[in-house]
Image: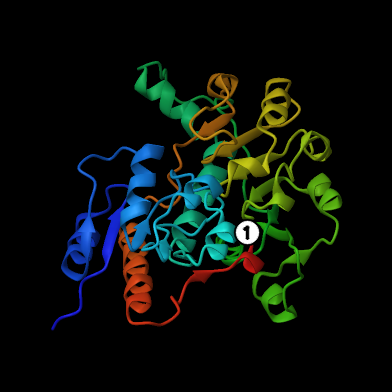
Amino acid sequence: MPRERLSVVVTRRLPDAVETRLSELFDVKLRDDDTPMSRSQMAEAMRDADVLVPTVTDEIDARLIGQAGERLKLIANYGAGVDHIDVATARQRGILVSNTPGVLTDDTADMAMSLLLAVTRRIPEGLAIMQKGEWQGWAPTALLGGRVGGRRLGILGMGRIGQAVARRAAAFGMQVHYHNRKRLRPEIEEQYDATYWESLDQMVARMDVISVNCPSTPSTFHLMNARRLKLMKPTAVIVNTSRGEVIDESALTRMLRAGELAGAGLDVYEHGTDVNPSLRELPNVVLLPHMGSATLEGRIEMGEKVIINIKTFEDGHRPPDQVVPSML
């Protein structure tokens, strides 16, 4: 007698190829529209399913996990970050959590470099002039930005993505510096000609560009707070493709408005879609709607990782990308 297929609930629309494969392998419930589930819908899904496939837009806290049914044994997150899931409570309830690390490294690093270039070369300002039909022709002093080559880049968080940013920055002729919880092995530093700073304060004060590439954890919340932002040179810019909570957004906005920082490129925000209105008004700020991982190839690879995690779990083994509290 064939084994009953796992009941899998997916909380958001995924690429067609991923949804098709999930449907072939499991008893899957897909979303008809691409809107986040309400908490009541999420609670219902967690009561009835064997596996939940959430995304970064789903806040799965202790209270929601407390409503999970006995069947739920795996939360297979579609995404690398799991700060929206109470992993410790899930573990206590006997629910495994997995994620999709590694597949978005190059896409996110590409976006970090795109923001860096957009801010330093004032690309959005030029684009706005063209779109409004206001261009009057070339002028020697118009829209003068800064040369990227030779500038000091300080990478905050030298993991997979941080190292991918370093590789790209080195190709542009930038000087690579970094701060990390642990210093990298000498051969990795040599690969990027990277300089390690044990003191984040000292690194921040000397950089031309800061790229935030660390995960969101209690220890990184407001790591770039008002005091640390004030250590940056007034000619420096900051780029964030990691998590919005790492930067004190209000303090950053005040400094940009006061001309105490040269610019910022942001793909993530401290309060999700509730972006500080003043940021939108500043010409030296480039804002993107969390597009760092938005490539079709990356999103399909994320789905493939989710499927492997679920299939491995179904076969009675530990999901290859299982997340445990000690990792956070």
Residue 18 higher or lower than 294, as above or below: below
**What residue is drawn where x is 57% and y is 30%?**
285
Q: Residue 295 vs residue 165: left or right?
A: left
How far across and down, in percent of the image, does residue 276 sit? 58, 24
Q: Quadrant of the C terminus?
A: bottom right
Residue at 38% across, 50% down: 294
**Secondary structure state at the residue bearing disc 1:** loop
Most foreground residue, 152 or 80: 80
**Compared with residue 275, is residue 95 higher up or lower down, i.e. above or below?**
below
For the point 36% across and 53% down, the residue is 47
Q: Nearer the viewer, residue 97 or 44?
A: 44
The image quadrant of residue 213 is bottom right
In this view, 207 is above or below 234: below
Residue type, label 1: Gly
Q: Where does residue 65 sit, x and y in percent of width and height? A: 49, 52
Camera-side residue: 191 or 157? 157
**Camera-side residue of 10 and 282:** 10
* Residue 51: image location, x then y, percent: 35, 62
